[in-house]
Image (cartoon, rainbow, N blue to C red):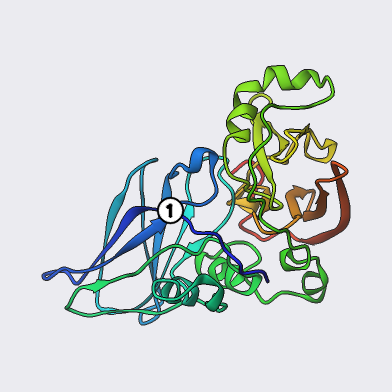
Amino acid sequence: MRHSLSPLPAVALLVLAAGVAVASPVSGRIATPAAPAASLPALTLYAWSLTAAKLYSVTTASGQASFTIDVPPGRYYVFATPADPGAPAIYGAYTEFAACAQSQPKAACPRHGLRTVTVARASVEGIDLTDWYLDDEVNRELDQILGQPGSAEPGEAELAAPKFSEYPAALYSGAPAPALAGDGEARIGRDREALVAALGSRANFAGRTVLVRIGCGAGCESVAFVDLPSGRVAYPPALAKLPPRSSCTERGPLKFRRDSRLLTVSGQEGDQLMTRYFVWDADSGTLRGVASLASAVDERCVPGL
């Protein structure tokens, strides 16, 4: 798993209050996940009690810079996920990396495991949610905490499925192209406002690409890719119409990461939950299917929810 991270802006204050009668604040910073114009999206903040196996949460409004959760004394994992519709399905967390990076160069902080926060009567400071690029093991652990489909022990097929870490992508640090390029693609004119905004933002996929979600009618969503070095716009046919969101895909049908060329699309097909794996080649502008994984639909997966 890669862990050479560029600095992320600290844009919000995390405040956790412990206890009922006497508040014991836990404070820190939040770095925004990759988003157009590096804006802070709405977030759902979670504090998972290792002591009582109980989850506490609060959802912020877009741009909201501080929040408070009242939690009793105990030991916690603290993490967050974007709550805006269509936001990337990623986690940010207080990790060993986040704690280490407060006093050490990021290159000297290779460990990204979740770090325990101990809450007592006194205030706790420096709980920074600055690690948004977690490895597969930590992502799976957080999925288990949230009770997402697939939270059970992975089967043989899932263990053999492609991993984000197997398709690393170096982060592009150069200047973006001065204008969009699409070889006469008619859809660029229709989507120009969103595509121009993407060209002016940071990569959120495959190191150098901005993945843009495009509405295509009620309950329909497609995807465009904007390549920052060239300005080239691509509309991968495999992502022309994403599966609808359902209780089987509570965090959305699409999963992708800034540090990986791998992308997955999940949706219910009959009595199965199908996940298809694709790898993006920015140089050739092609999205290549590499695998698919079918799993039994959990009893919570009810079409139309």
| Horizontal side, residue 230 vs residue 137: left or right | right
Q: As rendered, which of 224 and 69 lies closer to the eye?
A: 224
Numbered disc total: 1
For the residue marked with disc 1, what is the amino acid? Pro
Q: As rendered, which of 60 and 175 lies closer to the eye?
A: 175
Residue at image position (25%, 78%) is 73
The N terminus, quarter of image: bottom right
Name the spot of residue 213 as percent of width and height, x first: 65, 35
Q: From this view, report whether residue 138 is shown above or below residue 222.
A: below
Residue at image position (55%, 44%) is 87
- Secondary structure of the residue carrying tag 1 is loop
Q: From this view, report whether residue 2 is shown above or below residue 253.
A: below
Residue at image position (84%, 41%) is 285
| Horizontal side, residue 192 vs residue 50: left or right | right
Name the spot of residue 235 as percent of width and height, x first: 79, 33
Q: Quadrant of residue 237?
A: top right
Q: As rendered, which of 280 and 24 lies closer to the eye?
A: 280
Q: Which residue position holds label 1? A: 9
The C terminus, quarter of image: top right
Name the spot of residue 62 as percent of width and height, x first: 39, 40
Q: Quadrant of residue 239?
A: top right
